[in-house]
Image (cartoon, rainbow, N blue to C red):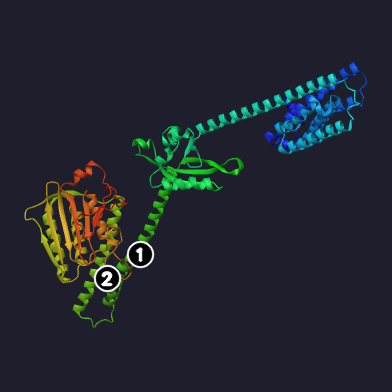
Amino acid sequence: MERLLAGLVHESARSDATESARHRRFIASRLTMGVIALACLPVYVALRGAPDVLEFVLFACLIGPLFAALALAQTGSLTFAHGISATSFAGFIVCVAGATGGVSSAATIWLVAVPLEALLSGSRRSAVVATVVATVATVVIALLDLTGALATSDAVPPFFASTVFALFAIAHAGALAVAVSRAEDVSRNARRRRDSENRCLFQAVDDLVTWHDVNGHIVSASAGSMKLLGVPSSALEGRGLLARVHIQDRPAYLKGVSDAAVGGQAVRVQFRVHYGDALRGDSGRVIWVEMRASRLDGPGHEASGVIAVTRDITLQKRHEEDLELARIKAENADALKGRFLATVSHELRTPLNAIIGFSEILSSETMNYIDADQRRDYARIIHESGHHLLDVVNSLLDISKIESGNFDFSPAHFDARALVNGCIDLMRLKADSLGVALQADIPAEALGLVGDQRACRQIVINLLSNAIKFTPAGGSVMVTMRGDRQRVILSISDTGVGVGEEDLDKLGNPFFQARSTYDRQHEGTGLGLSVVRGLVGLHGGSLTIESAKGEGTLVTVELPLDCTIIRDEEPRAPIPIRTATRRVSRPVKDEVDKEYKRSA
């Protein structure tokens, strides 16, 4: 039966499930009434004989619903079909009322059922058409009653007509009630099935679905709250979700819900929430979520609330942070390359020009006028330039070996006091030539240290060289050294130019010099302090720099008395260079991203 009814539905209504159901109900009820009328016709003829004109009109009106059903199946117009059905019903009532007393007949009141039937099973337009038909039928009954045309009408006995009409009315009302009840059952079952599907869907997905009222408070939430936030859905109702939003992101969350409620477009907002019961202090874990909120429209298209879908984007945020960190590192690498080119072009080109130029002069046969003293000066310049190039290359090799973990680290026991004194004696000649006073405060007794002696000597020489180089004539450099049961502390302070606060955090990066340009006032590659940092890290020590522009620099190196104990316990972590201005009494720790690997 359902298949037959579905086949009678017009193709224009088949795509819409609701409209198709309305068409099937209409066709089923009209076919039922028409078939019953056709079945009663032979019985009536057998009992009453050939029908007269009024009886013929009555049966035509009873069969009229068949034509309404056929019209709906052919045209798909529910309004047109309801017009035919209402006309047949009203005509039947007019005939019965005319045979049973006109306006005073009980059948006249049934004209009220014509628009009601159309309103219950049709549309507003159908109800308007049925109302017009019922009104016209009422006027016709009144006119017939006033003109006296009904007085001579005795074709149908009043008792028989009333009985037939009552049966027809009861059958029609019963069919209408069954159709309405069936429609409600279908709608209820569809709603239950939809709700069940939605519950299964919300339980299957990890995303959190929340429904908000016009004030933004959560009315209900899906079971995804347990997967996303670790709390039951009831804990989010009201202002429960707002209480779990990170305090810095609450304005963004509230603005997103408000914008969704006001505007017609979906709103996306990202914010942080505390996982677990934040109201009880369980807020140690913070996750990133993204909420997509849309407005729910009520009757008349006014805003009735907001529905939001929230999902975890912590991994996505972490990936974005990794990409941003990679971008920063790439930019830093590009800047490092620029500094490298600026440094190398200056540090290599100048001594190479001197070596090439003076070697050509010495090898020329036309330079017989050059005496022996000049030749010795030229040879000395070539020798110093060659050593300068060798220092640059050695620094590059050292920093490369330290970073790759291939530095030849050979710890041994030696006297740290004697090593520092030797470095001071080595650098004193250079300090005197530049007019810088080199002073020392070294303990008289021996200070044993287990470490790489060559690396420690390089640490002291590089720090002394920097201090002397950046101290103008008339300034001083002070070297102090002391030891305790666990470490050796070496401090080198100068009265030089110092480092500005904007450059202080960058000290120790390869090829960096404060205000580095192609025409620097002070020579150097910027690798000395980077090498010192790496060598101190290999020993498990720490490095602190305090400086201010125009106020000099204080560098403090702390080394353990036995670096082999530290190196054997665990691989070396990256050492931070603690930096501070000389006006600050306590150094401030500056975390450094770059790691130094443990040497082989």
Q: Position of residue 138 (x, y in %)?
A: 81, 33
Mark 1 or mark 2, whichever is nearer to me? 2
Q: Quadrant of residue 191?
A: top right
Residue, disc 2 = 521
Residue type, label 2: Gln
Residue at position x 59%, y 29% in the image = 193
* In the depicted structure, whether residue 487 falls above or below residue 120: below
* Between 20 and 453, the one nearer to me in the picture: 20
Q: Which residue extends farthest top?
A: 47
Labelled disc at residue 341: 1
Residue furthest to the left in view is 444
Residue 159: give x, y in percent of width and height.
Answer: 84, 19
Q: In the rendered structure, are the residues bearing label 1 and label 2 in contact, judged by CB atoms less than 8 Å apart?
A: no
- The location of residue 286, given as percent across then percent down, is 38, 41
When asked about the image quadrant of residue 471, the answer is bottom left
180 in relation to 443, above or below: above
The disc at residue 407 is: none
Judging depth in this view, the residue of 300 and 165 nearest the camera is: 165
